[in-house]
Amino acid sequence: SYELTQPLSVSVALGQTARITCGGNNIGRKNVHWYQQKPGQAPVLVIYRDSNRPSGIPERFSGSNSGNTATLTISRAQAGDEADYYCQVWDSSTSFGGGTKLTVL
Amino acid sequence: EVQLLESGGGLVQPGGSLRLSCAASGFTFSSYAMSWVRQAPGKGLEWVSGISGNGHSTYYADSVKGRFTISRDKSKNTLYLQMNSLRAEDTAVYYCAKDRGDSNWYFDYWGQGTLLTVSS
């Protein structure tokens, strides 16, 4: 299966910008999707196909994908953004990254 | 409103079998691929299996291939996961997830999950 690498944790000051990376071999050639999961809850799709936001997801959430790294960017971080974030791709089967815990300080 | 309601989880002994169900509503069930995704306690997400909208194509993670079978019943708007030869490492919350289309293989709606514990 296709391997995706995420940092275990990312910290961001309240109101600042958080960037969560997802590494994979030539990941820029694939569609990358991002999910937010808060404790005790099911995941929520926040970005699909690299940079598209589902309805209801704030504009503060954005994504990019190039080369060997995809990035989820959360602008003006809020306390409510604290969660685990997972990247995901399809490459003959579905692969998830290991997840990144975002802490808002 | 899209709703996905999983059921069937519980405590099973190693080597045992169990069938999970996911009742879907709020969308045209047969038009969308569906998947099962699991999460072991304190761990990340792991895709388990997927099925196309018409049920003709099925896909499995290597970790469950030959042991799990995914299926769907259009008349009941229900997704199933038959799990055989269960192992301790299958212990997880199992989520049912709706594809955003038919075989796009990313997921715009998730159920709340059902817990499977494999233990003697």
Image (spheres, helix red, strand yellow):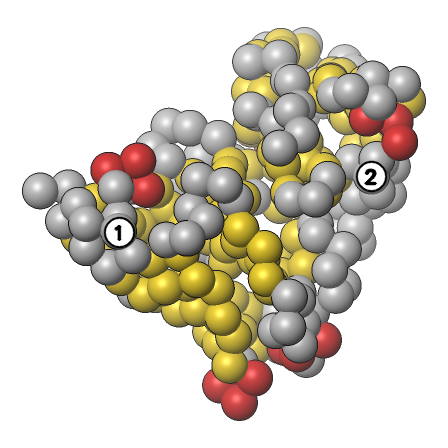
Residue B12 locus on image (x, y percent): 17, 52
Residue A47, can we see it? no
In terms of image quadrants, where is residue B114? bottom left
Label 1 – label 2 distance at C-alpha: 34 Å
| Quadrant assignment for the N terminus of chain A | top right
The residue carrying pointer 1 sits among few (fewer than 14), some (14 to 19) or many (20 or more) residues within 10 Å by Cα, namely: some
Query: What residue sits 89% from the left and 31% below the top?
Result: A29
> Could you tell me the amino acid type at mark 1?
Ser
Residue B106 locus on image (x, y percent): 70, 50
Farthest residue in the front direction? B66
Residue A48, can we see it? yes
Q: How many numbered marks does the figure carry?
A: 2
Query: What residue sits 67% from the left and 30% below the top?
Result: A2
Farthest residue in the bottom direction? B75
Q: Name the residue under label 1.
A: B85
Residue B93, placed above or below residue A99: below
The front one of B41 and B102 is B102
B118 vs B102, left or right, is left
* Parent chain of label 2: A
Circles 1, 2 touching at the beta carbon (< 8 Å): no
Residue B83 locus on image (x, y percent): 33, 58
Query: What residue sits 24% from the left and 59% below the top?
Result: B17
The front one of A75 and A52 is A52
Residue B49, placed above or below residue A82: below
Residue B71 locus on image (x, y percent): 49, 70
> Could you tell me the amino acid type at mark 2?
Asn
Query: What residue sits 62% from the left and 12% below the top?
Result: A7
Q: Name the residue under label 2.
A: A31
Residue A26, placed above or below residue A47: above
Of the two numbered discs 1 and 2 in the rendering, the one whose residue sits closer to the viewer: 1
* Parent chain of label 1: B
In terms of image quadrants, where is residue A96? top right
